[in-house]
């Protein structure tokens, strides 16, 4: 009596489902980095494949799929270039994966799907370092193990059906395999040097330059600024008043009419900086951003980082561009002003020669409205931030006289316009001023106790020199909300925040587990090993007894061996070369076989003749005990070619 | 030194016309001759030993003598003797057949030991002493002795010590059927052989002999090789006694000649190896249990064990 028990599951189905999930994970891991077209092609083809598999009615002919796959590979090869290796490769792999899905799958096809998925996942590791990778990785490892075990059953008996319980048992037991291998992984995890830099990312240099911080503020060259919400740095610190969240990066002091830059000379030689106030210590995790400026909360007092240069205007630069994630401790003082005894006034009053007289006039007018000289900066600040000027990132005036257009014509712009206008007006009014670039605000993550500062928070403000010293003035009217709070306080953002917290800890405790720590561990181990040696050094006699004598003995034995065993003479080397060559032709000389006898046994006439010529020439010297001259050896060697 | 290997090749080629199928034997004989040694041919009668000897003598322009050994042959039958002359009233020396350049001693094992030793002494010393007077044998002097391996009745086999005096021992063997057909068709060519023009003369022959002995280079590497062979014969499990020093000399002398025949003025291992089966087996004593084995093969296998210098 054959009765089909209903909860039986065909093993083929489970293998298929797991295979699709594995492919999906591979896809998800790279989804963010590839172009939309490829993603949609993949999704469409995979959907088609699932339909085919479900209905079991139709399979694409294999030759057609293979041909397509080949052309995809060729196409990807075509798209590869040195600047952009990984993304096209990943995209090509993705399409290959979807083609594999379409095929009528046999054992090797499944294996290929797994391999491609793994490649995709590895590809994602090349593109980014993210905690998500480890999640994908773990899921994939578990699924792969299960799937391969099931696949072995399937390959033995394609129509095998197993009760649900059995399958569950198999799955659970397969899960043990990666679990058992974990301790080994852990060991490797601790011992292998880790990097805070995505492996092989240099292959991918052409990544679009991140908008945000720049070391020269250029006005009127772009009309739209894209907001980039990727993080530039995270600062672990206490939560402070949002009004003080200015992250100082660079000071710009020279204006040429359209752009601000840093003048070349050292701004102040002997600086007597005096800043007083509450000290705040931050631990900053700075993302690689291809520049040399180090950010810290205004006003940074000291930053602990190797090879750091502190400038007179309280900016800090590294010697090399920051091309990997770095971590540093910064101490900032929440001071109202930077007191500086003497400044180079000419430098901070510099104005472009062709400055519009209208701007000068406007500055003077605005200044004259101030009640006292102290109030001039405030007057100008109010004029800009509380006047008719609007903050905008779109349709910025593109022109050769951007400042004039901003002040008199368009009356809207981004922080760069506001700050530039203010600095110029201050200077025109006779007050030394400079631009300070950096970031403004940031989201405080209560879970991780850190500020997350995204690229879009890049900001420029002004510092004016008054009798109190340098004071910070921010003319940009944008509400502080835009810098401190997320645009959308929805669930998605909260999830992202949680994920960022995980990422932060990952960076802080795993990736930033820095080289020094590994080095110190290494030193500890080393010193542990060294101890017995130290004792030997104390006792010279013992040292000689245990080290020098055996060393000398073994060395002399070795030398003797070399001498006795005999270095090969030139002739011997030559004949060895000849015999080796003949061996390649399939002739091996017996040890009792004479050379001529050996050559005479050859069948190929050409080979025989040339071999005979060599042998004759060789014997003429060898058996007449004549030394070979260098030319003769050369000639004989050339005969062997 | 001018290597006249082409002349020797020419001799071999010319004589081959009269000695169908005996080219190898002829060549070996010439090697023995130019090595200033003596040759022992062990073979059945009627295979062309005499023809071979005559051919060599004629081609080289040398005198030829023949001694047919019987058990009543006396030493004086070989060496010659003094006979009283009536006319002069004195004893006149009548030289025996040994006073020729090339002497064929047929069936040497049928002569009595006394006669044998007289002959062998002449071979070794290249002189004979008769009635107190010493007569030098002509130069070059080459003895081709033959012995019949089958007949044992009434023979006196040469002792090993005497065999050692022959530089090589060869056998001619039956000719191939093609050669034999030729012989049957044309009949014996011995008569024609007597009338051939000599290719060399005595002086040239002596010159070549001197060149081979004196001007053919033998490297220490080859001497080491030869010594290894000698040592192998002395320590072989098949042999009671290995090569004597004279035997060792035979190896190098024949090797030099072989090299000269190949147009070389230096010896290579093959020169020794090729001739080993002719130079060694008759000089060594095989253990009784191996007496019946093919001696040449045993010697060959010994040599196969020895590494060549290069």
Image (tube, coloured by chain):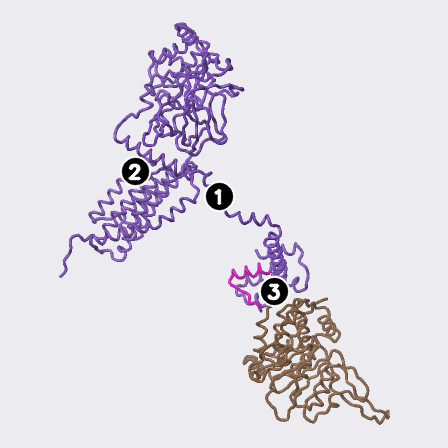
For label 3, the SS is loop
Q: Earlier in the sequence, mark 1 or mark 2?
A: 2
Q: Is the same chain shared between marks 2 and 3?
A: no
Q: Mark 3 sits on what residue?
A: B310
Q: Mark 1 sits on what residue?
A: A524
B172, above or below A523, in the image = below
Callout in the foreground (3, 1): 1
Q: Mark 2 sits on what residue?
A: A39
Is the residue marked by circle 1 packed among few (<14), some (14-19), or many (20+) residues within 10 Å? few
Decide if residue B23 is in sight here. Answer: no
* Residue lying at 30% horizontally and 38% vertically, measured from the top left: A39
Q: Are marks 1 and 2 in contact (CB under 8 Å)?
A: no
Chain with purple colouring: A
Is the residue marked by circle 2 packed among few (<14), some (14-19), or many (20+) residues within 10 Å? many
| Marks 1 and 2, how far apart at CA | 50 Å
Give the colour in which the image draws chain B: brown
Q: Quadrant of the N terminus of chain A?
A: bottom left
Query: Hey, which quadrant is residue B240 in on the image?
Result: bottom right
Residue A117 vs residue A286, the one in the foreground: A286
* Residue lying at 37% horizontally and 48% vertically, measured from the top left: A183
Q: Which mark is residue B22?
A: none
A409, above or below A250, in the image = above
Report in which chain the residue with disc 3 lies.
B
Where does the image place residue A403, in percent across and percent down from the top left? 40, 14
Is A496 one of the magenta-colored residues? Answer: no
Residue A122 vs residue B170, the one in the foreground: A122
């Amino acid at each position: 009596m054959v009765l089909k028990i209903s909860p039986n599951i065909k093993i083929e189905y489970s293998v298929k489902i797991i295979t699709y999930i594995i492919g999906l994970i591979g896809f998800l891991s790279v989804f963010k980095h590839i172009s939309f077209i490829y993603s949609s092609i993949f999704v469409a083809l995979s959907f088609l494949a699932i339909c085919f598999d479900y209905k079991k009615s139709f399979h694409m002919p294999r030759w057609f799929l293979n041909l397509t796959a080949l052309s995809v590979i060729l196409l990807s090869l075509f798209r590869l270039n040195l600047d952009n290796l990984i993304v096209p490769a990943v995209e090509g792999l993705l399409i290959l994966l979807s083609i594999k899905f379409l095929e009528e799958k046999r054992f090797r096809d499944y294996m290929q799907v797994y391999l491609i998925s793994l490649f995709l996942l590895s590809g994602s590791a090349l593109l980014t370092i993210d905690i998500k990778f480890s999640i994908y990785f773990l899921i994939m490892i578990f699924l792969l193990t299960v799937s391969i075990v099931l696949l072995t059953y399937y390959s033995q008996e394609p129509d095998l059906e197993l009760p649900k319980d059995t399958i569950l048992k198999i799955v659970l037991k397969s899960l043990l395999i990666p679990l058992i291998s974990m301790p080994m992984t852990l060991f490797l995890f601790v011992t292998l040097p880790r990097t805070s830099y995505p492996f092989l990312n240099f292959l991918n240099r052409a990544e679009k330059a991140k908008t945000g911080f720049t070391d020269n503020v250029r006005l009127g060259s772009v009309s739209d600024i894209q907001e980039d919400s990727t993080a530039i740095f995270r600062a672990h610190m206490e939560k402070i008043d949002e009004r003080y969240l200015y992250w100082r990066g660079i000071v710009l002091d020279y204006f040429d009419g359209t752009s601000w830059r840093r003048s070349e000379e050292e701004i102040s030689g002997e600086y007597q900086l005096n800043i007083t106030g509450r000290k705040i210590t931050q631990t900053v995790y700075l993302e690689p951003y291809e520049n040399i400026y180090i950010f810290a909360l205004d006003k940074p007092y000291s930053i602990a980082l190797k090879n750091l240069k502190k400038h007179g205007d309280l900016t800090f630069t590294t010697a090399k561009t920051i091309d990997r994630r770095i971590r540093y401790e910064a101490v900032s003082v929440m001071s109202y002003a930077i007191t500086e005894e003497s400044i180079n006034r000419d430098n901070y009053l510099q104005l472009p020669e062709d400055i519009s007289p209208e701007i000068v006039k406007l500055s003077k007018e605005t200044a004259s409205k101030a009640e006292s000289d102290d109030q001039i900066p405030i007057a100008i600040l109010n004029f800009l931030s509380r006047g008719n000027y609007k903050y905008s990132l779109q349709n910025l005036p593109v022109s050769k006289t951007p400042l004039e257009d901003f002040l008199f014509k368009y009356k809207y712009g981004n922080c760069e316009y506001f700050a530039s206008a203010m600095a110029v007006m201050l200077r025109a009014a006779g007050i030394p001023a400079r631009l300070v670039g950096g970031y403004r605000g940031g989201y405080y993550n209560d879970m991780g106790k850190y500020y997350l500062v995204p690229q879009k928070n890049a900001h420029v403000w002004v510092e004016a020199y008054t009798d109190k010293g340098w004071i910070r003035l921010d003319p940009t009217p944008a509400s502080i909300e835009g810098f401190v709070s997320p645009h959308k306080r929805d669930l998605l953002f909260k999830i992202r925040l949680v994920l960022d917290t995980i990422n932060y800890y990952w960076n802080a405790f795993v990736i930033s587990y820095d080289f020094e720590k590994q080095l110190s561990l290494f030193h500890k181990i080393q010193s542990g090993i060294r101890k017995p040696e130290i004792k030997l050094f104390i006792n010279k006699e013992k040292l000689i007894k245990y080290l020098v004598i055996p060393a000398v003995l073994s060395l002399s034995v070795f030398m003797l061996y070399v001498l006795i065993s005999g270095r090969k003479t030139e002739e011997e080397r030559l004949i060895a070369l000849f015999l080796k060559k003949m061996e390649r032709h399939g002739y091996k000389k017996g040890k009792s076989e004479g050379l001529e006898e050996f050559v005479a046994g050859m069948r190929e006439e050409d080979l025989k003749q040339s071999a005979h010529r060599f042998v004759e020439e060789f014997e003429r010297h060898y058996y007449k005990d004549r030394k070979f001259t260098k030319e003769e050896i050369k000639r004989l060697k050339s005969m062997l070619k | 030194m001018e290597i006249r290997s082409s002349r020797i090749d020419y001799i071999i080629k010319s004589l081959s016309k009269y000695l169908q199928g005996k080219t190898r034997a002829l060549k070996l004989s010439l090697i023995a001759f130019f090595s200033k040694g003596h040759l022992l041919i062990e073979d059945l009668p009627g295979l062309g030993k005499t023809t071979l000897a005559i051919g060599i003598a004629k081609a080289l322009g040398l005198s030829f003598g023949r001694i047919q050994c019987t058990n009543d042959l006396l030493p004086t039958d070989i060496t010659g003797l003094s006979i009283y002359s009536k006319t002069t009233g004195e004893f006149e020396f009548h030289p025996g057949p040994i006073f020729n350049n090339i002497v064929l001693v047929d069936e040497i094992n049928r002569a009595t030991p006394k006669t044998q030793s007289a002959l062998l002494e002449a071979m070794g010393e290249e002189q004979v002493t008769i009635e107190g007077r010493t007569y030098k044998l002509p130069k070059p002097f080459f003895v081709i002795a033959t012995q019949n391996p089958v007949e044992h009745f009434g023979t006196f086999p040469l002792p090993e010590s005497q065999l050692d005096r022959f530089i090589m021992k060869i056998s001619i063997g039956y000719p191939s059927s093609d050669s034999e057909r030729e012989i049957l068709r044309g009949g014996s060519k011995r008569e024609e052989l007597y009338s051939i023009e000599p290719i060399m003369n005595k002086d040239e022959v002596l010159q070549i002999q001197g060149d081979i002995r004196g001007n053919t280079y033998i490297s220490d590497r080859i001497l080491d090789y030869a010594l290894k062979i000698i040592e192998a014969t002395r320590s072989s499990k098949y042999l009671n006694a290995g090569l004597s020093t004279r035997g060792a000399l035979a190896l190098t002398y024949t090797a030099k000649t072989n090299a000269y025949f190949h147009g070389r003025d230096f010896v290579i291992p093959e020169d020794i190896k090729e001739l080993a089966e002719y130079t060694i087996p008759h000089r060594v004593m095989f253990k009784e249990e191996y007496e019946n084995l093919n001696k040449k093969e045993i010697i060959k296998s010994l040599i196969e064990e020895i590494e060549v210098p290069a």
